[in-house]
Image: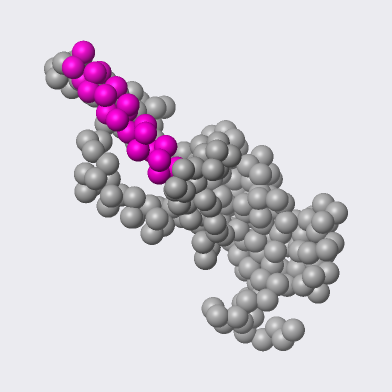
Amino acid sequence: MSTSRQRSLLIETPEGVVFSYELATPALRALAWVVDPSPKSAAVAAQYGVPLYATLREGLADRADGVVIATPNALHVEQGLACVAARVPMLVEKPLAHTVEEGRRLVDAAEAAGVPLLVGHMRRHSPIMDASIRVIRSGKLGRLVGLDSTTLTRMLKPLNQHGWIQEREGDDRRVRIIRLTTAGRAKLQHGLPHWKRAQARIEKTLGEPSMKKLEALLARVEAASKNK
């Protein structure tokens, strides 16, 4: 592989596999090496015909211009400090650390060494999130009382098991396309009147003044949870 005009980008996956990509141009990417102590890593390295390293420090010795750390959360600070020691810029997936103290330790080390450190909040720039915001603001979902972000994995599993949804991967592996099946649409239509009756009963029982007080209280609770 020619090294002229090439840059290395080391990427760590949630499974602990670390990839280093040689970037000759934005359109050309080739796997340069793999770091992973698990047995399956040998097959990955062999598949792409690249060197295999047992530790991140060994990989960093092969030099990379940037690192994306997306390994288990407990490893973020340790691996981030290794990148600082190697003076390699990094993007660390959220959360940066398990505690404020550990996070501060990594941030202080990066600032002292002049090594760029960025926390991955890519969903703020996701077209999926933009589309969600537009739908919410349009009022199609009704009057917004509260909103909490969460992963869909656990919520979708029982729906899938009952045959109410179908899933497939999008162009990006982080994207999952979810569609209601015929059985799912039937279940939705069956449940919707019950939900509406329950909502109407709550509003009637509490009355408009109490509903407004409840919504205000929920807003205060949500704000307090974000500021803790």
Q: Quick check: can you spot residue 135?
A: yes
Indicate the quadrant where residue 125 lies: bottom left
Overall secondary structure of the magenta section: helix
41 above or below 138?
Answer: below
Rendered position, 129 above or below 53: above
Decide if residue 198 is on the left or right side of residue 153. Answer: left
Q: As drawn, is 42 to the left or to the right of 6? A: right
- Measured along the vertical axis of the image, is residue 144 above or below residue 118? above
Residue at the far left: name it. Answer: 209
What colouring does the structure picture have? one colour
Q: Decide which of 177, 101 is in the foreground and name it.
A: 177
Q: Position of residue 190 (x, y in %)?
A: 37, 34
Residue in the foreground of this view, choosing between 149 and 107: 149
The residue stretch that appears in magenta: 184-205
Residue pictured at 70% horizontal, 64% vertical: 19
User: Nearest the camera: 4 or 181?
Assistant: 181
Q: Residue furthest top?
A: 205
